[in-house]
Image (cartoon, helix red, strand yellow):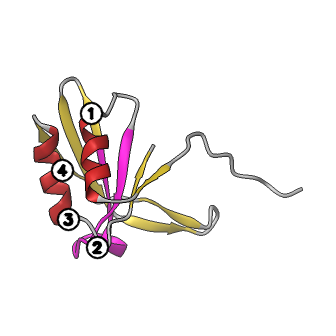
Amino acid sequence: MRSRTVELYSERVLRNEEDLLEHIEALDEDEGVRIQGDLENHVHGGFIFVGYYRGSYCVNICDKVWNSKLRKFTAGGSDEWYYFDKAEQAFRFVMKEAKRPLRAWMY
């Protein structure tokens, strides 16, 4: 019998920087944004995650590692955490670290 992977959440592609800023500004505590990073000190450029919790925006940067069982890239180690009071501050920070062209997903 073959095992199947079940996705517990769905992702929606964010097409441009304007979309990304709009979604960061509107984040609820149970939502987040994942962005492909372009970071030399993280495996495969890393992933950048943006969330919102208790009135501040949290940006997590981590390695991007290949999971051969799932056959896709997943979040790895080497976590770095940054906190911002305003969505625009988090957005500006993220855009300095994001790969171009922008690849981002809302979940």
Q: Quarter-wise, where is residue 31 in the image?
A: top left
Closer to the camera, 24 or 35? 24
Mark 4 touching mark 1, by CB under 8 A? no
Q: Which residue is mark 2?
A: 100
Task: Please tell me which of labels 4 and 2 falls first in the chain.
Answer: 4
State the SS at label 4.
helix
Task: Look at label 3 and name its amino acid.
Answer: Glu
Instruction: Give the number of the disc on residue 52.
Output: 1
Instruction: Give the number of the disc on residue 107.
Output: none
Indicate yes or no whether the magenta region holds residue 2.
Answer: no
Q: Which residue is mark 3?
A: 97
Task: Please tell me which of labels 2 and 1 falls first in the chain.
Answer: 1
Farthest residue, direction top:
54
Task: Please tell me which of labels 1 and 3 falls first in the chain.
Answer: 1
State the SS at label 2.
loop
Instruction: Specify start and end residues of the magenta stretch as a single range.
Output: 32-50
Q: Residues under labels 3 and 4: Cα distance?
A: 10 Å
Task: Please tell me which of labels 3 and 4 falls first in the chain.
Answer: 4
Q: Position of residue 37 (x, y in %)?
A: 29, 66
Task: Look at label 1 and name its amino acid.
Answer: Tyr
Work out whether 20 lies above or below 28.
Answer: below
